[in-house]
Image (spheres, grey):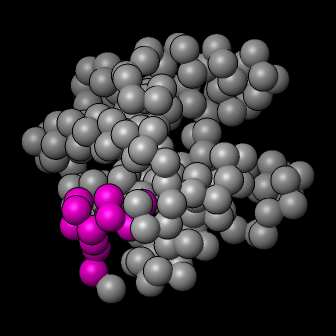
Amino acid sequence: MQLPSREQAIELLKDVGCEPKVINHCLAVTDFALQMANKLKVKGLRIDLQLVEAGAILHDIGRSKTHGIDHSLVGAQIAQQKGLPLPIINIIKRHIGAGITDDEAAWLEWPRDIYVPQTLEEKVVCYADKRIDHDRVVPIEEEIKKLKSQGFDEGAERVRNLHDEITQMLGETP
């Protein structure tokens, strides 16, 4: 299957039962992700803007069934059942935190897999998700502080590293 259009992706969120506030969050993440992706493209990096858009819109599709940390796994399963392309499934599966390590996945009793963003598109969507609280852009320090306060020091460090990587690629703070 080819990548869904913006309209098809939004319709899919509605069809599976995502609440309007989830859809609004996904659209805010999409706008932020596309801003970064366009700047990266101008800088000469190879990035698939259509994949960023579709993946960002659909990254929280699993929230139609659960709001737990496993919404990424549930979302990947929904995407697979809907016949979405593997690059979108991977964006959905890898957007939690700044990735879930093998040890964390084992602790969560998740199937063995890669849950850390690998591609530039995955990293951009994951990072955009960290910067959007509900539907507004927040400083990255807010997300890092929240993770640390919840005892997720390693996750906070991964978010910091992802922020540094994106900032370095852009040549500016997003």
Query: Can residue 57 be seen at all in this image of the molecule?
Result: yes
Query: Can residue 46 be seen at all in this image of the molecule?
Result: no
Image point 32% across, 19% down: which residue?
Answer: 173
Residue 78: % across, % down: 56, 72
Instruction: Confirm whether the magenta stretch covers residue 7.
Output: yes
Looking at this view, name the residue that lies furthest to the left: 42
Position of residue 155 relative to residue 120, above or below, is above
Residue 32 figure quarter:
top left
Residue 123: % across, % down: 43, 46
The answer to whether residue 139 is left or right of residue 67 is left
What range of the chain is rendered magenta?
Answer: 2-13
Residue 6 figure quarter:
bottom left
Residue 9: % across, % down: 32, 64
Q: Work out which quarter of the rendered image holds the N terminus and state it.
A: bottom left
Image point 37% across, 23% down: which residue?
Answer: 136
Q: Nearer the viewer, residue 60 or 124?
A: 60
Position of residue 74 relative to residue 155, above or below, is below
Q: Work out which quarter of the rendered image holds the C terminus and state it.
A: top left
Residue 144: % across, % down: 60, 20
Image point 44% across, 15% down: which residue?
Answer: 139
Disc tally is: 0
